[in-house]
Amino acid sequence: MSFAPVVVRDVSADDEHEFLLLLEPLLPMAYRLALGLLRSESDAEDAVQSAVLNAWRHFGQFRRGSELKPWLLTIVANECRRQRRNRWWSVIKRPGFAFATYFEANGNWYWLLLSTDPSAQTYKGPGTYTIPAYLYTGSGQPLYKGTAQLTVSNAQFPDFGGSVQATLNGLEIVGTQSQVTVSGDWTCHFTPNLGPA
């Protein structure tokens, strides 16, 4: 299904009814984008609602004669990125623990996120932990999920190190039959004011 381009010409910045009429055909597409980025129906609904409110607040700055769809979808994508950043910080602040690392493979950047459910597992020093894991593109698109073995072999503050090994299953975007294996060593050095460096 495709929508005809919505080009804004004669809507004033304070005409809420006309603004909503212009946006209405784009909302299903905005929701699909948010759902693809956040993988949660309720988070996607919240992101679209916040994006529409942001679009209304900044509609006076919108260039008349331009197409509305790319403008709105950019606002939705930015809102999804903001929500993911907030989700990441809430993971870090919980009493469980999280591990994330970037790496390059075949010319592309990826990041691996492992985080515990604090009610089920907390950090207890060196050892091996079985942790839920997600592999994302460098831009934050989730590709694979599964379970990883995170080994902490060096835990002398401020330096930590160990290894990680995971076999992850593909999400819908890459095909649910595909798998990827991630393994390697890791190090982390905490600095007094910045945290991990």
Image (spheres, rainbow, N blue to C red):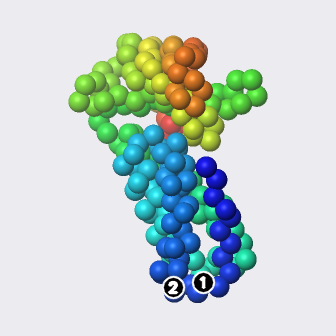
Q: Residue at x 59, y 63 (%)?
A: 72
Query: Which residue is more in the foreground, 157 or 195?
Result: 195
Q: Residue at x 66, y 76 (%)?
A: 8
Q: Which residue is mark 2?
A: 15
Q: Which residue is mark 1?
A: 11
Query: Which residue is more in the foreground, 22 or 114?
Result: 22
Three-letter code for the amino acid on which mark 1 is drawn: Val
Mark drawn on residue 40: none
Q: Which quarter of the picture shows residue 157?
A: top left
Position of residue 128 relative to residue 36, above or below, is above
Q: Which quarter of the picture shows residue 177?
A: top right
Position of residue 189 relative to residue 54, above or below, is above
Q: Which element carries disc 1, helix, strand or loop?
A: loop
Q: Give me the C-alpha separation between circle 1 and circle 2.
A: 7 Å
Position of residue 101 relative to residue 151, above or below, is below
Q: Residue at x 72, y 72 (%)?
A: 66
x then y, percent, for residue 184: 58, 15
The answer to whether mark 1 and mark 2 are in CB contact below 8 A is: yes
Q: Which element carries disc 2, helix, strand or loop?
A: loop
